[in-house]
Amino acid sequence: MPGPFTVLVADFLDETSIETPLLEDIARIVVARATVESALEPYLADTDAMIVYHDISVISDATFRRAPKCKCVVRAGVGYNNVDRTAAAHRGIVVCNVPDYGTEEVADHALALMLALARRLFPSHEAIRAGGWDYKTAFGSPRLRGKTFGVVGCGRIGTAAALRAKAFGMDVVFYDPLKPDGTDKALGVRRVYSLEELLEQSHVVSLHCYLDETTHHLIDAQAFAKMRPGAMLINTARGPVVDQKALLEALDSGHLGSAGLDVVEVEPLDDESLRQHPRVIFTPHSAFYSVEGYVELRTKTALEVRRVLLGEKPRNPVN
């Protein structure tokens, strides 16, 4: 059996109860608990593989050139925009992600945000806590059946959200320039070929796209202007997909009816105007989480590391 290797958990985790049983026969695990890239430097000379979460904003060539033994970086999550894939590939380091964990949780969460906004759950709850009991608190709640649910990004999570919205009797439409023809037929939903067309017809716009240079501020002032008056925005993808300044302006003008946000442009949220807005509800980047999903994420991450260290083909390389 090859080894012993050293696996560096760069950030986020402070224990390895799930990873250790999967790797202990071939590797020792070192937990760095870093929040900035420079804090990894003392560990890099001995690192054969690295597990990265999201607390470090970038893993760059500054790290890779100090880790001559490193064979892989596994981003424990779907997104991998905080890893410089090109620099890693230049040094022969494979970068992988875990694209299928959390699919159920994030799709459920997107629909939960929509339902909470549409059914005015938080205003009703707060009114009752304040001593009231008046059904008029729910005035303005729309019937969701027959409304158009627009999905931006029809990957695994977007597909799961589309099927859930379809089960509510909504008219589901998606925009995703990367999906092959026929995806709409397989799912039994509609497809449009421009973001503008989706925005113009959707009562609910739910974001499920990756964050990269093509999607940064994808939803900007021009996009908000194209949306239906009173539409709802749901973001369980990445905060910077939405231009936060434009979001506030659209809310303040009344053109955007409401927003449900699991992610924001700067986390933790540092904008009091957005934090206190009466037509926004938040969750703290927690859509990914369930007890089962968290175990799944960590298990699949460790198994991908194991495959690479043993010379097997990785399942989810992204460079």
Image: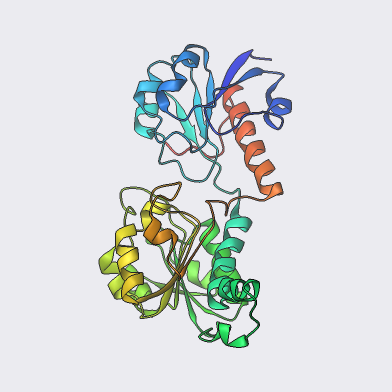
Tell me: residue 41, above or below residue 313: above
Q: Could you tell me if residue 243 is visible in this image?
A: no
Q: Quadrant of residue 192?
A: bottom left
Judge from the rendering whether residue 114 lies leftward or rightward of residue 16; answer left or right.
left
Q: Could you tell me if residue 208 is visible in this image?
A: yes
Q: Quadrant of residue 254?
A: bottom left
Q: Residue furthest left?
A: 222
State the residue in front, 156 or 118: 118
Judge from the rendering whether residue 133 lies leftward or rightward of residue 157; answer left or right.
right
Q: Quadrant of residue 118?
A: bottom right
Q: Position of residue 104 (x, y in %)?
A: 63, 57
At 34% from the left and 68% from the top, the residue drawn is: 195
Tell me: residue 249, above or below residue 81: below
At 64% from the left and 71% from the top, the residue drawn is: 129
At 67% from the left and 18% from the top, the residue drawn is: 26
At 49% from the left and 66% from the top, the residue drawn is: 183
